[in-house]
Image: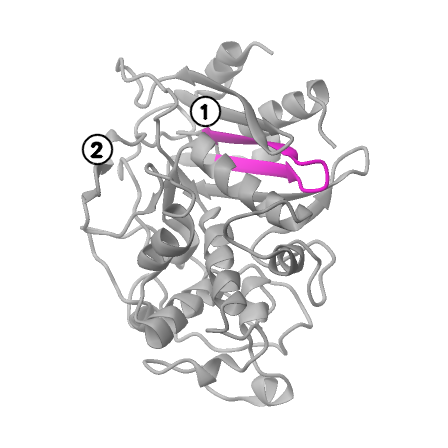
């Protein structure tokens, strides 16, 4: 595959790709620059915005806390919430909203049109204020609008509720919990949740991260978009470090000594939940063109697009991250082209 030619076709300045096999990183490839027109090349240290892949990390944190007995997947979340609660109505009386519902996008929520857009001027609203509907990032209070587990509706608001639960129960934000539960145990040094208003994390400056570009290959106005819903959209990482998280999850699934989750929790995460055959807890479950099962997580935000496909039974997969918003779904963009190429010419199963 002539990646540079395809990058030019899609106006993508920079690409990072990691392939793992038998639960080890097999190879990594890097192309282009972190910012158009500069000599800041993409390499193994390059940090990209993972956007909604954030939800997979949040789900791992929640499942670890369930594993430790600090949370219950099937308890009414109002029993955890203190700063804000879900208002009871005909739908919640029929079935209470649970953490499992929230993780699987089956909590009875519909996100407002235009909600959860990037923060302006380093604004950093609290999850409670977002849920109350008193910020421009979610203009109406979050309420259950259909009986939980009767439909699947992708919801950033649902993950915002998870953030509030962690704050109310543990006194920890998602960035703090993820660092303690996932990043430090795996030895990750270039992975973090970017909180609006912050400019550095440990030894990492946000200025060292990839710059976002639009479908024409021009730098976006936000440069690097920061989101109010940190738990659902604020993860920044490298392809290799993201691969390390996925590999650990698959090790747990296979009973091969994953550091974060037990085999029971990993298998629960990667099993269809509720009313949807293609939704696990924090990830989506699909089959490739040959019918082989895998899970996917993908992100698409201002100036960035990425996707991972992991074959949890075959212990291999691929991750692609770009600093471009192509104006089309991942499967139609350069991200999808690279994933299809790797899956066709590598032994993935």
Q: Residue at x 35, y 27 (%)?
A: 46
Tally of marks: 2
Residue 204 appears in the rendering:
yes
Q: Residue at x 21, y 36 (%)?
A: 205
Disc 1: which residue: 16
Place of residue 137 in the rendered image (x, y in percent of width and height, measured from the top left): 33, 61
- Which SS class for mark 2? helix
Quadrant placement of the C terminus: top right
Which is nearer the eye, 304 or 343?
A: 343
Place of residue 184 in the rendered image (x, y in percent of width and height, measured from the top left): 36, 47
Residue 335 lies, with reference to residue 52, above or below; the image says above
Disc 2: which residue: 207
Q: Residue at x 66, y 72 (%)?
A: 149
| Label 2 CA crowd tier, 10 Å (few <14, some 14–19, many 20+) | few
Which is nearer the eye, 108 or 96?
A: 96
What residue range appears in magenta?
306-321
Quadrant placement of the N terminus: top right
Instruction: Give the spatial CA distance, label 2 vs label 1.
Output: 18 Å
For residue 208, which quarter of the picture? top left
For residue 328, which quarter of the picture? top right
Is 300 positioned to the left or the right of 229 in the image? right
Residue 212 lies, with reference to residue 265, above or below; the image says above
In the image as oriented, which residue stretches furthest toward the right? 291
Q: How is the image coloured?
A: one colour
- Please identify the dominant SS of the magenta region: strand
Which is nearer the eye, 161 or 156?
A: 161
């Amino acid at each position: 595959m002539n990646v540079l030619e395809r990058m030019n076709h899609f106006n993508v300045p920079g690409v990072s790709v990691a392939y793992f096999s038998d639960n080890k990183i097999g190879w990594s490839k890097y192309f282009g620059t972190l910012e158009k027109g500069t000599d800041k090349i993409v390499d193994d240290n390059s940090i990209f915005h993972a956007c909604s892949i954030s939800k997979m990390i949040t789900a791992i944190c929640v499942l670890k806390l369930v594993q430790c007995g600090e949370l219950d997947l099937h308890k009414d979340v109002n029993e955890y919430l203190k700063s804000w609660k879900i208002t009871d109505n005909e739908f919640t009386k029929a079935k209470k909203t649970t953490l499992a519902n929230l993780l699987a996008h089956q909590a009875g929520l519909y996100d407002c049109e235009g909600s959860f857009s990037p923060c302006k001027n380093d604004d950093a609203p609290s999850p409670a204020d977002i849920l109350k509907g008193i910020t421009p990032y979610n203009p109406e209070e979050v309420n259950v609008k259909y009986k939980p587990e009767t439909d699947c509706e992708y919801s950033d608001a649902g993950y915002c509720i998870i953030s509030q639960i962690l704050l109310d129960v543990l006194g920890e934000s998602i960035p703090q919990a993820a660092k303690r539960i996932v990043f430090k145990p795996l030895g990750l040094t270039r992975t973090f949740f970017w909180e609006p208003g912050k400019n550095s994390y440990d030894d990492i400056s946000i200025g060292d991260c990839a710059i976002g570009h639009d479908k024409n290959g021009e730098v976006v106005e936000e440069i690097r978009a920061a989101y109010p819903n940190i738990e659902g959209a604020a993860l920044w990482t490298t392809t290799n470090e993201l691969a390390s998280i996925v590999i650990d999850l698959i090790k747990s699934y296979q009973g091969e000594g994953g550091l974060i989750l037990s085999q029971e929790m990993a298998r629960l995460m990667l099993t269809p939940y509720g009313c949807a055959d293609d939704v696990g807890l924090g990830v989506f479950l699909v089959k490739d063109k040959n019918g082989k099962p895998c899970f996917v997580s993908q992100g698409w935000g201002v100036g960035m697009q990425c996707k991972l496909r992991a074959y949890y039974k075959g212990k291999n997969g691929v991750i692609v991250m770009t600093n471009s918003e192509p104006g089309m779904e991942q499967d139609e963009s350069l991200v999808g082209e690279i994933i299809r190429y790797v899956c066709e010419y590598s032994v993935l199963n």
